[in-house]
Every structure is written in C-alpha cells, then in structure tokens.
C-alpha cells in the first residue's frame, strides 16, 4: 500500500470473456466452471479443443485466475493467432501483460483492441488502465472519458476515472467516482480497495480498515487486498503520523531527552540536582508515553473484527523481527563501522560525531523508503 495505483486487471477478464460468442456446449460448460472457480475442470474440457481460438482464450482466463501468468500469456497468444481481427484476445492479453508488470506491452495490446473495435467500453477501459500504469495521463484520461461516455452505468467506468484522478492527486474527485462505482456494484472488492486507498492518511484509520475488511470478505483470495488490509490495520493500530496523544506528549518528551543528552555529553554543567531532575523527568515522560501509546494501540486492536485481528497478530511479529534485522543491517552495522574507523584513525570527537550524523541522515532519507519499496514487496512475493 498502499498505493491507490493498483492493478485491476482481474475486473476486466470476466466481461471480456463473456463478450466472446460461445459455439459449443463444451465452451459453455468451461465458462461456467471458470465462473465457479473450478479451473482445473475447465482446463480439462478446454484441452480437448486445442485448435479453437475461443477455447484458448478461456484457457488463458483459467490460468490467469490461477495466477499462472506465463501459461495464460501463451494461451492468449495462441488465441490471437486463431482469431485474427477479434479484439477480445488482445484486450485480455493486455490484462495478462499488466499483471506480469510489462506495462508498455500491455498498453500496446490495449491499443490494438481499441483499434479493432473502438466503440466497446471494455477495450477503452483496458486502454485507460494501461495508459494509467505508464503515467501517460493524456491517453489515460481520453480513454477513461470515452469509457464513461460509452458505459455511464458501468461501475468500472467510474472506477477507472477515479483511479486516474487519484494518480493525478485529485483525491476528492477520485473518492466521488469510487463511491459512484460502489453504488453501481457494491460487491466489487477492487472498488472497495481503491476507495480505502483514497482515504486521507490520518489516524485512526477506522473507515479505510472497514472498507478493506468488506473487500476481503467478498474476495479472501485476493492477496493484494489482504496485504492492504494488514498494512492499513498496522497503520491504524501502531500509528503512522501524529494524533492528539503524540502532540500532547511527544514535544515535552523530546525536549527532556534533548536536555538530558546535552547534560550527559557535558555541553552544559548544571547543578547535580538539576541533572537528576532532568533525568527523572525524561524517564517518567518516556515511560508514561510508552504506556499510553500501548494502551491506545491495544484498544484499537480490540475494536477490530476477529479475522482482522488474527491477520494482524499473525504477521506483526514476523514483520517486526524482519524490520529490526533490516535496521541493524542498514543502520547499526554502518554506524558501528564508522565509529570503529574514526577511532582507529584517531579523528577528533567533533569529526566522529559528524560522521555519525551523516549516517543518521542518510538512513533517515533512504532506510524507510528501501523497506517499503523494496524489502516489504519482496517479502510479500515470498509468502
């Protein structure tokens, strides 16, 4: 998360497949089995029609929903070869490529579908989604506007306009379209997810957590939405940013910590009673702040639904341990190395403190960003 910019490729797959005219009872049965998520049985039926383009397209959908994207791409490309001039396989290929992270190729495939049939809202939607993914805002907004014109009562029309508005940081406009999409289809988990992601990044995040809880209830198999629920729940419980408790207690606590540090390093020399009082006040405020923070977070956790609370507890300790390891590797070891080198070279204490300050600043600028953008996604893929 919690990017508002999330892939909604799954949402178009069903409508695109439904747009292909079925020619046999086998294809009808395979379609029903895919809808029922019985993908293995559908693939068994479709394997008996190896040279049928529609069967290959349905096979691609089955592999897609099973998250076997390589096989899905192979099947949809076979479908394109068997169905020349038909736009549906190109649009579905755009979905598969988008899911694979090949966003420019996804845009090219969507453009081909639009070229073959520009008056179909589904293909304009695919074009808008793919253009949004590569930040081609002009193309994305034009295709989204055309999608809305062609299908004003389709929830995904409002959803893609909202997604692009969110990408352009027009939060209120995005929320309006997401709510319109939800009104048209209140059971679409991807719209619930996007609406939650467009909520203000404030604490507590009660509303966004409730939206994601409903999205997970509707589709517990969507790993992205489950991950987003965990991230929002963590932000809700542990708190990212400031609330009234932080504003009330953090400032005096930091002032006392700074005063104690100044006395400890010998930069000022107050009477002993003042030094002891500053230390005692710092410890008291720190302990009180920690207790108040713990009780507040515990209360928020108890207010969650049992399933959300179990998800949070199951993943919190693992993530907490790994984040600690990450901190030690990226900050602790470099800081220790700088201290050892400075001492070995016999540098003045001011230079040593300057080196430590540089390490602190570098980690503050790069460390959290690396954790959220690199390490956490890598860990999520490994689960």
Image (tube, rainbow, N blue to C red):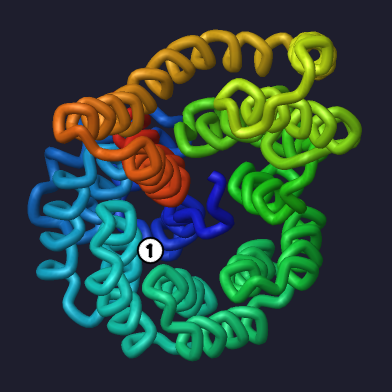
Q: Which residue is mark 1?
A: 21
In the rendered image, is residue 370 in sight? no
Residue drawn 34% across the image and 60% down it: 95
Q: Residue 124: horizontal and vertical position, in percent? A: 48, 79
SS for callout 1: loop
Residue drawn 38% across the image and 27% down it: 327
What is the quadrant of residue 207 in the picture?
A: top right
Q: Depth check: give the residue in front, 306 or 42.
A: 306
Q: Residue 156: horizontal and vertical position, in percent? A: 61, 64
Position above or below: 229 against 98: above
Residue drawn 16% across the image and 57% down it: 52
Position above or below: 61 against 90: above
Say whether residue 224 is left or right of residue 362: right
In the rendered image, is residue 287 in sight? yes
Position above or below: 315 against 13: above
Q: Depth check: give the residue in front, 129 or 188.
A: 129
Q: Depth check: give the residue in front, 273 or 214.
A: 273
Say whether residue 97 is left or right of residue 320: left
């Amino acid at each position: 998360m919690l990017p508002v910019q999330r892939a909604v490729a799954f949402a178009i797959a069903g409508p695109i497949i439904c747009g292909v005219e079925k020619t046999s009872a086998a294809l009808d049965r395979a379609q029903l089995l895919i809808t029922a998520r019985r993908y293995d049985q559908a693939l068994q039926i479709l394997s008996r029609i190896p040279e049928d383009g529609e069967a290959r397209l349905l096979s691609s959908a089955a592999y897609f929903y099973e998250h076997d994207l390589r096989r899905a791409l192979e099947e949809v490309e076979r479908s394109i070869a068997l169905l020349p001039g038909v736009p549906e396989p190109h649009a579905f290929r755009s979905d598969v490529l988008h899911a694979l992270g090949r966003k420019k190729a996804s845009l090219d495939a969507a453009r081909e579908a639009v070229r073959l049939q520009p008056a179909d809202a589904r293909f304009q939607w695919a074009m808008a989604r793919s253009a949004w993914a590569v930040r081609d805002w002009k193309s994305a907004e034009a295709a989204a506007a055309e999608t809305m014109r062609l299908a004003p009562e389709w929830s995904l029309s409002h959803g893609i306009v909202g997604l692009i508005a969110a990408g352009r940081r027009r939060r209120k406009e995005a929320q309006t379209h997401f709510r319109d999409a939800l009104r048209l289809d209140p059971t679409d988990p991807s719209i619930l997810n996007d609406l939650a992601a467009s909520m203000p990044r404030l604490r507590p995040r009660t509303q966004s957590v409730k939206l994601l809880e409903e999205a997970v209830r509707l589709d517990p198999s969507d790993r992205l939405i489950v991950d987003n629920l965990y991230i929002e729940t963590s932000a809700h419980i542990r708190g990212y940013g400031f609330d009234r408790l932080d504003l009330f207690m953090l400032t005096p606590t930091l002032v006392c910590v700074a005063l104690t540090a100044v006395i400890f390093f010998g930069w000022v020399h107050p009477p002993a009673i003042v030094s002891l009082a500053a230390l005692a006040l710092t410890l008291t405020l720190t302990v009180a702040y920690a207790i108040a923070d713990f009780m507040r977070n515990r209360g928020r956790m108890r207010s969650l639904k049992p399933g959300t609370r179990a998800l949070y507890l199951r993943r919190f300790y693992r993530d907490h341990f790994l984040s600690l390891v990450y901190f030690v590797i990226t900050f602790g070891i470099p800081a220790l190395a700088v201290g050892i080198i400075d001492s070995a070279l016999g540098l003045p204490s001011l230079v040593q403190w300057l080196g430590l300050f540089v390490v602190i600043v570098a980690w503050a600028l790069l460390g959290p960003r690396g954790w959220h953008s690199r390490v956490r996604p890598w860990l999520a893929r490994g689960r």
